[in-house]
Amino acid sequence: MQINWRLRELTLKIVYYGPAMSGKTTNLEQIHSHVDPLKRSELLSLKTAGDRTLFFDFLQLELGRIGTLTPKIQLYTVPGQTYYESCRKVVLKGADGVVFVVDSDVNRWGSNLESWKNLFKHLQSLRIPLERTPIIVQFNKQDLPNAMSPEQLKKLLNLGNNAVVSAAAIRGEGVLDTFKLVTRNVMAQAQREMA
Amino acid sequence: MDNLQDQDRNYALNIRVGLTIYPSQDKAIEQALLLLKDRCPAQFILLADSSGQLISIQGERGSLDVVALSALVAGDVAASHEIAAMTNQLDSCQMVLREGKKSSSFTCEAGKYMVLFVQIPGETPLGWARILIRETAEKIAEIVDRLPDPEDHLAAGLDNMPLDASLDSAIDSLWMG
């Protein structure tokens, strides 16, 4: 979170985290394609030749004036592939909120679990306070015929009070709901911290 | 006065980022960057926080996407920081030079929370630029570390609740369907 009192700007960072190919970049692409170009930046993607995220994707949205501040929301994705561990940690630095994108494909449960544990390991190593960092879980690819149900996934990840959203990001379903939920939670946390 | 300073200190500690920039600090940062631009001389300067959020720019930006550049500079410095940590070279005020024929650029840490990007013309001596950039980075870090002026407290309106229920409609208005 960055607050510039002269410009009355509040900038918040939200990171889309999750295993490889779970749909993190797709979420940002959908947001980018549905948001008024005057209210967003261009989508920045650092990709490999194989079109996989190498470092991060980045998109900034401007919400307009709310109360006395103008919030800007910065969205990042991390590279999902396991060998980009250091990059994930770097991108998570300074995160105000996280969207954990789950691949609902039944064959990917191991990758989901590994990535979920990995997220907490990094948050702890970066000293990001878990109790003050909203983490929203998106069950993506619910449109797949072999998708695990939200109930099964909740059990698998041993989710406590985390808010969850079902999605099929490739069709745009659940993308806005996820974004709204995480933004609302992050803003509420920012408000509590500023009060 | 002491009481006010204590409140400010507590306030800064409660905000977990990071980084809160008050009007007097913003002005002092702008002056430091302007001085660097003139003395170097630099073509373009960008200051962002370490998570990639733009704070200030000086010089000709042209069609440059400064928002994206802030994210990249922060990523660059953070990656460099990790490399230094892994190779046991970690030191304060890490600096990376990108040397080109027409121009060169430096990226460096400015204290704990900020990163500085400076682009200089090819003819500017690199050693000279390096010294000035390091000095400026340290000065900016000091500016942000010091307590805000009492006037800042009033200007910020810290007792106002700045965010309200119009958040949902603001998000909805982003979406074109």
Image (cartoon, rainbow, N blue to C red):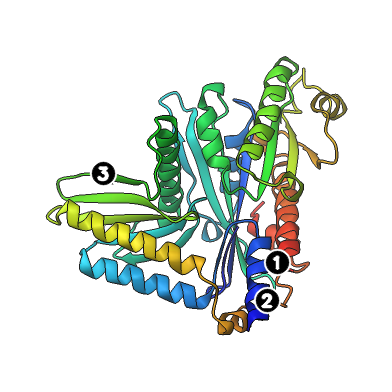
Neighbours of disc 3 within 10 Å: few (<14), some (14-19), many (20+): few
Q: Residue at x 50, y 38 (%)?
A: A56
Q: Is residue B26 above or below residue B174?
A: below
Which x, y percent locates residue A130? 73, 44
Neighbours of disc 2 within 10 Å: few (<14), some (14-19), many (20+): some
Q: CA distance from mark 3 to mark 2?
A: 41 Å
Q: Is residue B84 above or below residue A3?
A: above
Q: Residue at x 41, y 34 (%)?
A: B83
Label 3 chain ID: B
Q: Is residue B15 above or below residue A122?
A: below
Under mark 2, the amino acid is Leu
Tags 3 and 2 touching, CB below 8 Å: no
Read off the residue under disc 2. Answer: B158
Q: CA distance from mark 1 to mark 2?
A: 8 Å
Read off the residue under disc 1. Answer: A194
Q: Nearer the viewer, residue A53 or B51?
A: B51
